[in-house]
Image (cartoon, rainbow, N blue to C red):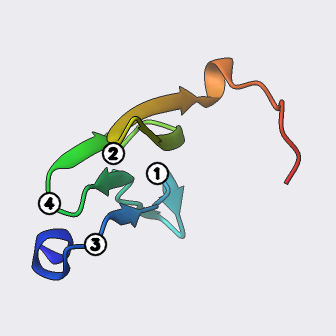
Amino acid sequence: MYAQKYALPILMSNFCGEYWNTKAGGKSAFWNEKGALIISLNDEEEGLVIVERINGILKGSKKNYDNFRYDFII
């Protein structure tokens, strides 16, 4: 695994659903620098993977589009 091999946190962002008659993989996820999975979505979940470092500890959460509020501007 790259996270452990290179001692870097890894974020993999993907989409789910169908595109050009092919099912997409989904499974967006975040691993810490030791290779431990912090948070992930399954292959059919739509949403955001959010990771925060609080007091030196990585914490993951999910924001699903069903209850997602647009309270920030990109």
Sooner in the amino-acid sequence: mark 3 or mark 4: 3
Residue 43: image tag: 2
Gap between marks 1 and 2 measured at Cα:
6 Å
| Amino acid type, residue under disc 2 in the picture | Asp
Residue 20 in the figure: left or right of residue 10? right
**Label 1: how many residues lie within 10 Å, few (<14), some (14-19) or many (20+)?**
some
Mark 4–mark 1 distance (CA, rounded to whole Å): 24 Å
Q: Amino acid at mark 4?
A: Gly
Residue 16 badge: 1
- Identify the amino acid type marked 3: Leu
Q: Which mark is residue 8?
A: 3
Residue pointed to by mark 4: 35
Q: Could you tell which of marks 1 and 2 lies nearer the N-terminus?
A: 1
Residue 53, placed above or below residue 26: above
Local packing at callout 3 (Cα closer than 10 Å; few below 14, some 14-19, many 20+) is: some
Q: Position of residue 72 (x, y in %)?
A: 83, 39
Q: Marks 1 and 3, Cα distance to the nearest angstrom?
A: 25 Å
